[in-house]
Image (cartoon, rainbow, N blue to C red):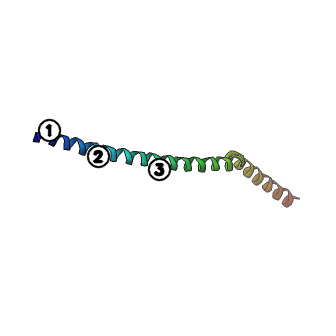
Amino acid sequence: MGEQEDLKTRVAVLETKNEAAEVRLNSLEIDVGKKFDRLEAKLDQLLRAAQGRPTWTVSLTVSVLLTIVTGLIVYVVTQH
């Protein structure tokens, strides 16, 4: 009988540990879910903010064209 009671005690301890692990897992799942929700909201905000801005290619092209035009204006003014 001592062996059976020892086994019952071990099973009870394992069940208690299992329940505690399930509670921790549920808590972690909730925390991770909240963090992903916040991350998704920030990403959506970032994407909305970036939609109204020109791409790097457009910005670079405009800068190069303005530099060329400024250089040509200076050239024309100094040559005449």
CA gap, disc 1 and disc 2: 20 Å
Q: Which numbered tag is attached to residue 4?
A: 1
Callout 2 touching callout 3 (CB < 8 Å): no
| 10 Å crowding of disc 1: few (<14), some (14-19), many (20+) | few
Numbered marks: total: 3
The residue that appears at 47% across and 50% down in the rendered structure is 31
Under mark 1, the amino acid is Gln
Residues at marks 2 and 3, CA–CA distance in whole angstroms: 21 Å
Q: Is residue 75 above or below residue 24?
A: below
**Residue bearing mark 2:** 17
Disc 3 packing (10 Å; few <14; some 14–19; many ≥20) = few
User: In the rendering, at what x and y percent does residue 56 appear?
Assistant: 67, 47
Sequence-wise, the earlier of marks 1 and 3 is 1
Q: Nearer the viewer, mark 1 or mark 3?
A: 1
Relative to residue 17, is residue 29 drawn left or right?
Answer: right
Q: Amino acid at mark 2?
A: Lys
Q: Nearer the viewer, mark 1 or mark 2?
A: 1
Under tag 2, what secondary structure? helix
Q: Residue 60's spot in the image, x, y percent?
A: 69, 49
Q: Disc 3 designates what residue?
A: 31
